[in-house]
Image (tube, rainbow, N blue to C red):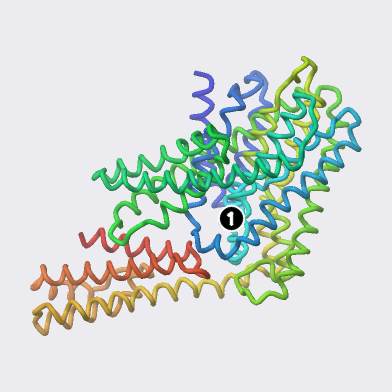
């Protein structure tokens, strides 16, 4: 009952803090962490949130990864595979090495394998934290796409390193780098294959379910199922969930307007509530880290501060290198292309749920019964890195973006949505002309239909109906059946064009989704 009350309280707090964050122009997940910390130290409350550490990742990570991955596309990943390799694999490995070296120098009682486990905890920026903090900030979509690509796959790298390092620490054996690489490659390949198979099976199941609510419910079960299945066969659950989400989204068809609207609303609610509980949990569990440190807390915090600096420094050097390489590239969608963008991407390395879950999942003893080396200090350092990388950027990122002038670059990228809108409009008018040649319409109805469809770009922008629209609708009602068929056909062509654009390289999936949502709403209202 105690756990249930805390979960319900965190959900309610998330709902309230969304509004507070909007008013204060602050990221509400960061406010949830602050609230969790404040609540955790209230006298008389339980010492910790009593949830099995092994359940944290399976409970929270799959739905949040699935929700985030639905906002991107295969085309983005095909175009950014170098970025994924450079950031999600190489940067994670470099951060692990730097943190492990720093930690062993600071804490003599820390073994090399335990230090590597610490490095794996704090290495991966959290895709949910990045999306929640950086998403509302007015910055170029190119930067958000880079952060999304990095965040969706770096957990897989970090988890493999962490699990291998912990196993080596517990067993007392050495860490085999070739074995680690082989495990990573095999786990990734198996996860991709599993994700594609599950997505295909899920599409078949949804085709047999006629109820829209039932199909939406399936998408909630799907990320948990594929994550657990992947972990069971020693594949990457993170990669499997991302692949399923990408494949399911890419397989969306033009006539699934109602289903897309329902699922979009459904997942917005799920993502908000799960994110609220997860970030509140981060704050609540900081108390357990403080209690475990006892009298050594000041010294541990000093070590943690050094590790925080190392984490930021490694990311800064990595982004500076990326800038020097990309500045000579012909790919205009790549990032960072300027020093200002490199600074913003450096500041957006927020840690989150994965860091918390890995820190809490550390075993307390080794195989010979001895305590896990410097466990309390590892948890304190990981928690400090989490708070520093989440709260500092979370509260200062909007000011940094404005100060560097990066926000000004975002205005030009809004034109991408207008390009997709015009493509949808041309597709609709072309289909309407084809249908009109077949149909037998009066001049009055034909003129009204032409005038209304000529304003489709306004409808796509969400402009309200005018008195003239109502007059044209009255004229079209005289040929209701034929007109409705032509309108539905034209809108179907527009939706198909937007979905095709979404799959193309260089097209912003979020821009396409915004246009598609307005078309879906128009279609459902007409139906």
The answer to whether residue 421 is above or below residue 32 is below
Which image quarter is the C terminus in? bottom left
Q: Which residue is mark 1?
A: 148
- Classify mark 1: residues with Cα within 10 Å, few (<14), some (14-19) or many (20+): many
Rendered residue at 56%/73% (across/down)? 411
Question: Is the residue 523 above or below the residue 236 in the image?
Answer: below
User: 428 and 270: which one is in front?
Assistant: 428
Relative placement, left or right, of 253 versus 137 is left
| Residue 504 screen position, x and y as percent | 47, 68
Q: Residue 497 occupies which quadrant of the picture?
A: bottom left
Question: What secondary structure is marked by label 1?
Answer: helix
Q: Is residue 459 left or right of residue 313?
A: left
Could you tell me residue 158's position as x and y percent? 68, 42
Towards the viewer: 25 or 291 = 291
Residue in view at x 38 percent, y 70 percent: 461
Instruction: Classify residue 268 as left or right of residue 295.
Output: left
């Amino acid at each position: 009952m105690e756990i249930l009350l805390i979960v319900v309280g965190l959900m309610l707090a998330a709902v309230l803090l969304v509004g507070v964050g909007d008013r204060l122009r602050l990221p509400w997940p960061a406010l949830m962490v602050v609230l969790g910390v404040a609540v955790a130290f209230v006298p008389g409350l339980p010492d910790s949130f009593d949830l099995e550490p092994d359940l944290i990742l399976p409970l929270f990570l799959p739905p949040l990864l699935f929700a985030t991955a639905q906002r991107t596309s295969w085309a983005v990943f095909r175009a950014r595979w170098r970025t994924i390799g450079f950031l999600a694999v190489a940067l994670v490995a470099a951060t692990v090495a730097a943190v492990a070296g720093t930690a062993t120098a600071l804490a003599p009682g820390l073994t090399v394998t335990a230090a590597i486990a610490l490095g794996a905890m704090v290495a991966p920026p959290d895709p949910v934290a990045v999306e929640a903090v950086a998403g509302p900030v007015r910055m170029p979509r190119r930067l958000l796409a880079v952060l999304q690509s990095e965040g969706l796959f770096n957990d897989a790298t970090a988890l493999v390193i962490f699990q291998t390092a912990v196993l080596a620490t517990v067993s007392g054996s050495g860490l085999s780098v070739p074995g680690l690489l082989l495990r990573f490659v095999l786990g990734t390949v198996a996860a991709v294959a599993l994700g594609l198979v599950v997505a295909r099976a899920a599409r078949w199941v949804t085709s047999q379910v006629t109820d829209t609510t039932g199909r939406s419910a399936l998408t909630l079960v799907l990320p948990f199922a594929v994550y657990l299945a992947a972990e069971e066969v020693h594949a990457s659950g993170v990669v499997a969930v991302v692949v399923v989400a990408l494949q399911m989204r890419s397989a969306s068809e033009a006539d699934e307007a109602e289903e897309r609207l329902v699922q979009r609303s459904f997942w917005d609610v799920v993502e908000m509530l799960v994110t609220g509980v997860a970030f509140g949990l981060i704050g609540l569990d900081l108390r357990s880290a403080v209690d475990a440190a006892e009298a050594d807390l000041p010294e541990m915090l000093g070590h943690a501060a050094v590790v925080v600096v190392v984490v930021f420094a490694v990311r800064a050097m990595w982004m500076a290198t990326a800038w020097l390489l990309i500045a000579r590239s012909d790919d205009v969608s790549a990032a960072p292309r300027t020093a200002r963008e490199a600074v913003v991407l450096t500041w957006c390395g927020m840690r989150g749920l994965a860091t918390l879950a890995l820190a809490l999942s550390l075993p307390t003893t080794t195989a010979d019964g001895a305590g896990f080396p410097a466990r309390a200090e590892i948890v304190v350092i990981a928690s400090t890195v989490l708070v520093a990388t989440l709260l500092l950027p979370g509260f200062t990122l909007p000011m940094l973006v404005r100060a560097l002038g990066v926000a000004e670059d975002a205005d030009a990228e809004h034109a991408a949505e207008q390009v997709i809108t015009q493509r949808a409009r041309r597709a609709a008018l072309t289909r309407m002309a084809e249908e009109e040649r077949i149909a037998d319409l009066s001049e009055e109805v034909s003129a009204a239909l032409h005038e209304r469809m000529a304003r489709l770009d306004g409808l796509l922008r969400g402009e309200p109906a005018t008195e003239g629209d109502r007059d044209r609708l009255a004229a079209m009602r005289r040929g209701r059946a034929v007109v409705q068929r032509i309108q539905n056909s034209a809108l179907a062509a527009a939706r198909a064009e937007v979905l095709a654009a979404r799959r193309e390289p260089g097209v912003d999936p979020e821009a396409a989704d915004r246009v598609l949502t307005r078309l879906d709403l128009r279609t459902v209202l007409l139906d």
